[in-house]
Amino acid sequence: MQESIDKFNIVKLAVGIKDIEILINRQISNGLLYSNDDHLLKMCFTTRNTPKLINEIIDSDEGSIYWVIAGKIALRQKIIGS
């Protein structure tokens, strides 16, 4: 049985953020966004509540975090696991 892809996405509100550039700069300044040996920018953060399908989100290779800025979905960041 194929799971709905909607189950593998997380929607996060970027409270107090006015545009994507400010969100990225805040992630960098807080040490959340970093580069590794692959030269890819990666982000590490925690949520207040662990998603119920965390293992499925990580294993599916299809999960994303959708950032809501000023009431609109403005940015997608792929979930790559831990």
Image (cartoon, rainbow, N blue to C red):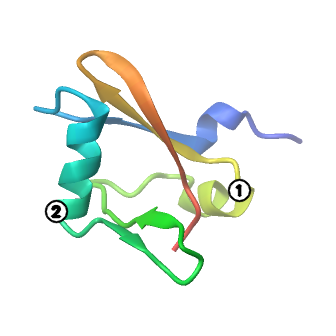
Left or right relative to 80: residue 14: left
Q: Is residue 63 above or below residue 6?
A: below
Above or below: residue 19 compared with residue 37: above
Q: Position of residue 3 (x, y in %)?
A: 77, 40
Measured Cα–Cα span from mark 2 to mark 1: 27 Å
Residue depicted at x 61% and y 44%:
8
Name the secondary structure under disc 2: helix
Packing grade of label 2 (10 A; few <14, some 14-19, many >=20) is: few
- Report the disc number at residue 73: none
**Of the image marks 2 and 1, the number of the one nearer the N terminus:** 2
Q: How many marks?
A: 2
The residue shown at (27%, 39%) is 21
Residue 33: horizontal and vertical position, in percent?
34, 64
The reply to whether the C-beta atoms of the residues labelled 2 and 1 are less than 8 Å apart is: no
- Taking the spot 45% from the left edge, 52% from the top edge, the residue there is 51
- Residue 60: x percent and y percent? 72, 55
The residue that disc 1 covers is 61
Secondary-structure class at tag 1: loop
Instruction: Classify 75 as above or below 60.
Output: above
Rendered image quadrant of residue 39: bottom right
Q: Amino acid at mark 2?
A: Ser
Task: Determine which of the numbered discs, if any, sits on residue 29 in the image.
Answer: 2
20 sits to left or right of 10? left
